[in-house]
Amino acid sequence: MDCEGNCGGTNIPDVCNVCNGPGIVAGTAEYDICGVCNGPGVSPGRCDCYNNELDCEGVCGGNAYVDECGVCNGSGPAPYCDC
C-alpha cells in the first residue's frame, strides 16, 4: 500500500510527511517556526505567525496605541487644552 492506500501504488510521503506532496523525498525541506513545510516563517514587521504586530508597549498583538499627544496608552489632551 502506498501512502494514499493504493495497493501497489507509488505515492510516498515527502520530507514534510505529505503524501505525494511537493517536497523532495529525502530532501532538505524543514518546517518553519509557524509549522509550514518550507514556509517563510514570521513575515517581516510582524511578531508572530498570525501576522500580529507589536503595539507601542511591545506586546505582540496588543491593543495599546499612541494617543494624539504621542504618548503610548495616553489619555490624550486635557479638556480644553492641547498636548
Image (cartoon, rainbow, N blue to C red):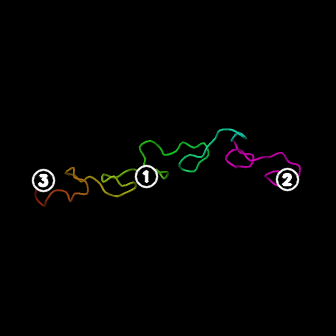
Q: Of the residues shown, which amino acid type is indicated by label 1?
A: Asn
Task: Specify the segment rendered in magenta.
Answer: 1-22
Q: Secondary structure at mark 3?
A: loop
Residue 58 x/y as whole percent = 33, 52
Residue 13 x/y as whole percent = 74, 47
Q: Nearer the viewer, residue 50 or 77?
A: 50
81 relative to 63 in the view: left or right: left
Which of marks 2 and 3 precedes in the sequence? 2
Q: CA distance from mark 3 to mark 2?
A: 75 Å
Dots 3, 1 in contact, CB < 8 A: no
39 relative to 48 in the view: left or right: right
Q: CA distance from mark 3 to mark 1?
A: 32 Å
Name the residue at 19% across, 57% down. Answer: 76
83 relative to 51 in the view: left or right: left
The quadrant in which residue 75 appears is bottom left
Question: How would you rate the neighbour count of disc 2 (Cα within 10 Å): few for under 14, some for 14-19, many for 20 or more?
Answer: few
Q: Which residue position holds label 1? A: 52
Question: How would you rate the neighbour count of disc 1 (Cα within 10 Å): few for under 14, some for 14-19, many for 20 or more?
Answer: some
- Dominant secondary-structure state across the stretch colored magenta: loop
User: What label sits on residue 1 in the rendered view?
Assistant: 2
Q: Secondary structure at mark 2?
A: loop
Q: Residue lying at the far right in this picture: please name it.
A: 8
Q: CA distance from mark 1 to mark 2?
A: 43 Å
Which of marks 1 and 3 precedes in the sequence? 1
Name the residue at 36% across, 55% down. Answer: 59
Q: Nearer the viewer, residue 38 or 72?
A: 38
Name the residue at 48% across, 53% down. Answer: 50
Which of marks 2 and 1 precedes in the sequence? 2
Q: Of the residues shown, which amino acid type is indicated by label 2?
A: Met
Question: How would you rate the neighbour count of disc 3 (Cα within 10 Å): few for under 14, some for 14-19, many for 20 or more?
Answer: few
Residue 63 x/y as whole percent = 34, 58
